[in-house]
Image (cartoon, rainbow, N blue to C red):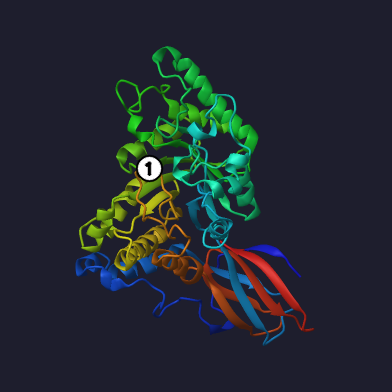
């Protein structure tokens, strides 16, 4: 018997016997990173008091008290409570779909989505999506197949490296039940975003604006509500409030961010969320968001980036320099909160300073503490790791910033996140019904659950429900 319901958040005394604590509730984690690689100064930043504050916020903001009625349950019957999904978005981009060079590596890559990750960011960079004007490469062709990539000796030299055709990627994400983010619709960057055929002079600015609108409407018409959300504009705060009204990127339509949201609001269903995304997290970013919303732009989430691209920066963190400390995180997130909107860590990079045991352990420690801080922040909705496989980033990005080696071998950073996401931040309980038809009450992480128990006739029942 399967039913679904939404569990109310209640504050009441439990009426059941807890036989086993949630996995990873406390005690040492044997597969945790080697903390000895971090300096004493680093641990002064991430001290016991800070850790307790993080734990308290996680308990307060990421959990809820739940109450469910188990119809027909027999007194004394074991009740198994399993959390099967998290409300929080733990994600990564999926730019290397079928591109890793062998079916075995591709299968391992795909398996991470739907297990560790419940969200994926799909590449929609205009430059490689539509290299020929009027012929966007939405559908998979031979050049996008695993067979093609398995035969390529130097994949990074291919123009569509890290830019798979989106249709098969979106279909894969849907088959896995993943949250999806389209990245990105409008961005002023000519190197990574603008097709070579886009106008380059002031005389054709009106044509550029029309092409921007055409792109937005084309994406809306093709994908509708198949993606959960879109980064409508990327890194646009650099152009907000410029006295000359021009873009720091060069030729861009005036007020392009506002116009992009206006057209997107017409082109996409209201169920699709709109993000704004930027690396600058300051008062100007908050002011830009406020200005756009005041004029009627629909923005649902504020994306903020955090890239530790320089391996030396991660080494400096381990040595105790004040880089990405709890105070730095608090300052950035408090600034982002001025927007009054939910936050998403939309792109993060944490690089191992060296590709050796110590370097990988440093990466894992930095990742674990930052993820804990971000997960505890009240307005945070999700975290997206950028390059999950070593040596698979864009030119100029570090080769050791993955959770996996180039051969898809898990690194300590992967195990650190797996321990948090799938164990410490999941609620799984073994309970006993204290009476026939008992009401079960517990406190757990927000998300989807399954209760399994036996009724008075000995028949096994299951009940799915949400803790909100």
| Closer to the camera in the image, 105 or 121 | 105
Residue 337 seen by the camera: no
Residue at image position (44%, 68%) is 415
Establish if 45 lies above or below 305. below
Quadrant of the frame with the N terminus: bottom right
| Closer to the camera in the image, 384 or 97 | 97
Establish if 413 lies above or below 351. below
| Closer to the camera in the image, 76 or 343 | 343
Q: Position of residue 281 (x, y in %)?
A: 33, 44
Callout 1 secondary element? loop
Q: Position of residue 181 (x, y in %)?
A: 53, 45
In the shown orientation, is residue 443 left or right of residue 348? Answer: right
Quadrant of the frame with the C terminus: bottom right
Q: Position of residue 104 (x, y in %)?
A: 57, 60
Q: Position of residue 252 (x, y in %)?
A: 41, 23
Residue at image position (68%, 85%) is 77
Residue 307 seen by the camera: yes
Residue at image position (43%, 52%) is 387
Q: Which residue is mark 1?
A: 395
Picture quadrant where residue 302 is located: top left
In the shown orientation, is residue 26 left or right of residue 46? Answer: right
Q: Residue furthest bottom?
A: 76
Q: Residue furthest right?
A: 457
Establish if 113 lies above or below 230. below
């Amino acid at each position: 018997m399967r039913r679904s319901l939404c569990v109310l958040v209640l504050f009441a005394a439990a009426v059941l016997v807890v036989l086993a604590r949630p996995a990873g509730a406390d005690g040492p984690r044997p597969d945790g990173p080697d903390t000895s690689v971090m300096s004493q100064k680093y641990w002064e930043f991430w001290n016991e008091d800070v850790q307790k504050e993080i734990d308290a916020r996680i308990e307060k903001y990421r959990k809820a008290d739940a109450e469910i009625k188990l119809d027909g349950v027999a007194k004394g019957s074991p009740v198994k409570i399993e959390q099967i999904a998290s409300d929080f978005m733990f994600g990564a981009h999926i730019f290397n779909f079928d591109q890793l060079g062998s079916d075995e590596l591709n299968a391992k890559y795909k398996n991470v989505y739907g297990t560790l990750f419940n969200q994926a960011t799909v590449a929609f960079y205009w430059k490689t999506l539509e290299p020929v004007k009027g012929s966007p490469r939405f559908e998979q062709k031979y050049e996008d197949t695993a067979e093609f990539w398995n035969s390529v000796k130097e994949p990074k030299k291919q123009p569509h490296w890290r830019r798979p055709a989106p249709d098969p990627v979106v279909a894969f994400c849907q088959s896995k039940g993943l949250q999806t983010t389209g990245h990105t619709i409008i961005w002023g960057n000519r190197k990574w975003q603008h097709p070579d055929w886009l106008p380059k002079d002031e005389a054709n600015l009106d044509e550029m604006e029309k092409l921007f609108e055409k792109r937005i409407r084309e994406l809306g018409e093709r994908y509708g509500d198949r993606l959960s959300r879109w980064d409508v504009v990327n890194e646009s705060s650099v152009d907000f409030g410029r006295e000359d009204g021009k873009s720091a990127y060069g030729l861009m339509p005036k007020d392009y961010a506002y116009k992009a949201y206006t057209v997107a609001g017409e082109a996409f269903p209201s169920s699709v969320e709109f993000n704004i995304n930027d690396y600058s997290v300051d008062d100007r970013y908050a002011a830009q968001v406020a200005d756009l919303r005041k004029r009627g732009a629909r923005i649902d989430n504020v994306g903020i980036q955090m890239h530790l691209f320089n391996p030396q920066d991660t080494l400096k963190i381990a040595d105790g320099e004040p880089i990405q400390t709890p105070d730095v995180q608090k300052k950035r997130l408090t600034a982002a909160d001025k927007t009054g909107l939910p936050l998403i860590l939309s792109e993060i990079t944490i690089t191992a300073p060296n590709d050796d045991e110590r370097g990988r352990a440093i990466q894992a420690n930095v990742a674990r503490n930052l993820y804990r801080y971000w997960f505890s922040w009240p307005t945070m909705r999700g975290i997206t790791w950028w390059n999950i496989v070593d040596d698979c980033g864009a030119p100029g990005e570090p080769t050791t910033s993955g959770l996996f080696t180039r051969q898809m071998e898990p690194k300590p950073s992967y195990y650190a996140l797996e321990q948090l996401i799938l164990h410490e931040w999941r609620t799984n309980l073994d309970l006993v019904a204290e009476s026939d038809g008992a009401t079960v009450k517990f406190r757990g992480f927000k998300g989807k659950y399954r209760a399994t128990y036996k009724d008075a006739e000995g028949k096994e029942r299951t009940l799915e429900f949400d803790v909100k």
